Image: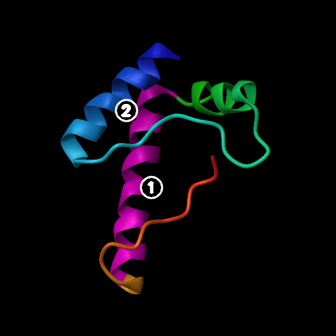
Amino acid sequence: MAIYENELQKLNEELGTDYQLSPTGDDTYEDMVAFYTSMTIEEFDTYIREAHEKEIEFNKRVGEGVAIPVDD
């Protein structure tokens, strides 16, 4: 999982974000690990970049400064 955490740190620095790898909703830590590690690091990079673009588009539609709710 460390390779994904390292890649996310690089992406956060590049994108100016503070994304974190954490389970959401009813998912367990193991579910989260299985989800991310089923991707190649290139697929993970694309997944994060696309999520970031969707967040930007969402914020444009509903107004600046509105965050997408995140389950903790």
Decide if residue 14 is on the left or right side of residue 48: left
Q: Position of residue 14 (x, y in %)?
A: 20, 41
The residue carrying mark 2 is 8
Q: Position of residue 69 (x, y in %)?
A: 55, 63
Circle 2/circle 1 CB separation < 8 Å: no
Please report the residue visible at 32 percent of the width from the left and 72 percent of the height from the top.
65
Please report the residue visible at 29 percent of the width from the left and 39 percent of the height from the top.
12
Q: Position of residue 62 (x, y in %)?
A: 41, 84
Question: Residue 28, relative to residue 67: is it above or below?
Answer: above
Decide if residue 23 is on the left or right side of residue 54: right
Number of the label disc, if any, that sits on residue 51: 1
Crowdedness of circle 2 by 10 Å Cα count: few (<14), some, many (20+)? many
Decide if residue 29 is on the left or right side of residue 57: right
Q: Label 2 is placed on what type of residue?
A: Leu
Q: Label 1 is placed on what type of residue?
A: Ala
Question: Residue 58, relative to residue 40: is it above or below?
Answer: below
